[in-house]
Image (cartoon, rainbow, N blue to C red):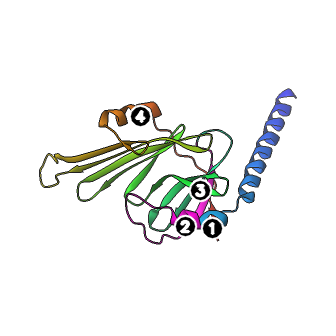
Amino acid sequence: MKTNLIITTMALLTISIMNTTCAQNNDFDIKKYLEQMNETPSDRYNIGDVVLTEYALIDIDGDGIQEVWVRGENNYQALYTVEGDVVKKIAYADGATDLVFYKNAVGYSAYYSPGRACEGAQMVKNSHLADSYDSEIEFDTSSEEQDVISESHWINGKESTSKACEKFLKRLGKPVEPPQPAWYAIK
């Protein structure tokens, strides 16, 4: 008898949580932010005019406030914080870029031909952009060893070192499984 009561209570709690999540998703007006998302510059390549087709809401930093994940044409996807009426890009990816999720951050890694690799991560704290790192390495693709031609590293937008970026990456911890949110069509 107690087992049935516990199972029924857990089922009702699960349904209640699911309804709350759906209500938050239904209350969110993606159209209010689309223009800003389309105007946000993409610093690793020129995406041109990508049409965004879907969005999902996820809580990257576990503070109870959801961030926005959008997907569009040409395998484009991006994540944003929403601060009042302003969106700020956390990370984005295209067909040549992979997103990497951490407990409180989203990173990216990419290999662009010929011979250019980029990676970085943006931390999110209390639904605001926090610390970040970015690295770009160019290789000599004409040699078998693909020797490094040049390296650039940044912490919080300021020039830094490879060692500092490695420390930052260790601070993030191991990657976690990407969220599997409900996706909604952008109409």
Helix, strand or loop at label 2? It is: strand
- Three-letter amino acid code at the position of disc 1: Ile
Q: Earlier in the sequence, mark 3 or mark 2?
A: 2
Task: Please give the name of the residue rendered at 44% of the width and 67% of the height, measured from the top-left corner.
Answer: 74
Instruction: Give the farthest residue toward the front.
Output: 158
Labels 3 and 1: the sequence-earlier one:
3
Q: Are marks 2 and 1 in contact (CB under 8 Å)?
A: yes
What mark, if any, has residue 87 been given in the picture? 3
Where's residue 51, x and y in %?
52, 71
Residue 49 got which mark?
A: none
Q: Residue at x 16, y 52 (%)?
A: 140
Which of discs 1 and 4 lies nearer the camera? The answer is: 4
Q: CA distance from mark 3 to mark 1?
A: 17 Å
Q: Nearer the viewer, residue 161 or 78?
A: 161
- Which residue is under mark 2? 52
> Mark 4 or mark 2: which comes first in sequence?
2
Image quadrant containing the C terminus:
bottom right
Q: Which residue is mark 1?
A: 186
Q: Earlier in the sequence, mark 2 or mark 1?
A: 2
The residues colored magenta run 35-60
